[in-house]
Image (cartoon, helix red, strand yellow):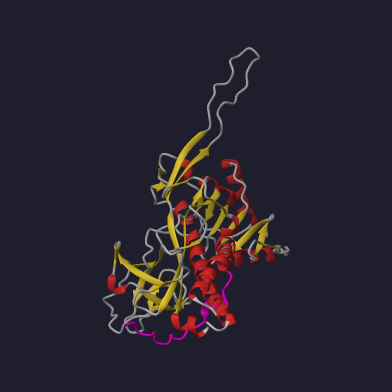
Amino acid sequence: MVTLSSADNALKSVYLGVVANQLNINANPLLGKIKHTTQDVWGKEIIKLAPYGINGGIGAGDETDALPKAAANNYVQFKTSLKNLYGRIELSDKAIRASSNSTGAFVNLLNDEMEGLIKASSFNFGRMLYGDGSGLLATVSAYNSTTKAITVDSVINFIEGMVVDFYDEGVKVAEASGFRITYVDRQNKAIYLSTPSNFGASIIEKDFKIYVQNSKDFEITGLGAIFDETATHLYGLKKSDYKWLKPFQSTTATEISDGLIQSAIDFLEEASGSAINYIACSSGVRRAYQEYLGAFRRNIEVTELQGGYKALTYNGIPVVADRFVPEGTMYLLNTNDFTMHQLCDWKWLEGEDGRVLKQNAGFPTYTATLVKYADLICDKPAGQAKISNISTTVTNPFATIVTTTPPAAPEEE
């Protein structure tokens, strides 16, 4: 007979290892290329010595001249706080009791919950990798109080089921926070929320910022932070004092070509000795690159990455289209320079009694919380590159599909 105790044991002994592997390797092709370590974690912070430049004690001279003056390696101290990453599942008491006499039914119940957790976590961790740590999903462009459509500047960070908060000039708008997204209109760049009937035009206004629930400024330090030209600091260091903290960026409008990619690779090799081994781009850029290859009747070579992802290649380097890369953008990365520093791998949050399944006070439901304390650090930001404003002239036939108005969202109490 299945009990809460056996469910607890299954979560800890059977599912934890599988889920941890899925989230560390298969959640996103870029994450699968990044090493994980518990080194350089001190208390609640990551403090890491990062070398830059080369040893200066090199020289040449006459056989009787003085030896070169010693000049040791240059180091700086990177410092960042561990970010708290969570994933939760919920089981109702009724569902547990209904499957208590059938092991197969209970296994299916847990499998469904864990698959949902992995899907949600994979989406959000993939999004964080390309974010700036602020958790910003989008900015409101307009709000239609009749259709309840919220038009935003970009929908790449949204998916149905997310719970979001709205902020006005850095302050959470309580009346417009904690609602679930019921529909994402990707053609018209709009989202719909599960909202009460009194959710009027005065609640959401233009330029409001949207974040994942309670996550503002608590996400990992992703590529957005490394390439943010407006940020004055990175890993606790002032960028103006350490110019090499600034990666290479090109914003000149251009067409995709092998020459464009190679010029960025050559620059990074010559300027910082970086060996690019991973290229990420938007789907529009990938289509443009495929068209470019087809125009010259070149074979399109495909490789398979860890986790089962397939990608085009440029001189053996995978070119991966990622939904979280901004349109018209390409990142050229040396993933050996990136490390996910963590206090520990994924663990279940346990109570004093050692249980991971806990009853929600006042409700006939049980929850289990998966937790990880970590942050991402790039040892050599100057060894990475970003190319923006790449022309994506290939027409996406799905962009012209006229969507129908979604069904009315269920009202929340």
Question: Splitting the image into 4 quarters, where does residue 367 fall?
Answer: bottom left
Task: Return the x and y of residue 366 as percentages of the image width and height.
Answer: 43, 75
Predominant secondary structure in magenta? loop
Up-down relation of residue 266 to residue 407 (above or below): above
Which quadrant would the C terminus be assigned to in this image? Answer: bottom left
Q: Tell me the quarter of the picture where residue 278 sits.
A: bottom right
Q: Give the magenta range.
A: 391-413
Provide residue 47's location: percent of width, then percent of height. Answer: 45, 44
Q: Can residue 79 be seen here?
A: yes
Queried whether the magenta region covers residue 3, the answer comes back as no
Closer to us: 403 or 381: 381
Q: Is residue 326 visible?
A: no
Q: Nearer the viewer, residue 367 or 140?
A: 367
Position of residue 87 in the picture relative to residue 315 (left or right): left
Q: Which sits in the foreground, 269 or 113?
A: 113
> Percent from the top left, x then y, of residue 117?
50, 71
Residue pictured at 27% horizontal, 83% vertical: 198
Which residue: 39% across, 52% down?
A: 230
Task: Please provide percent x and percent y for residue 97.
Answer: 48, 83
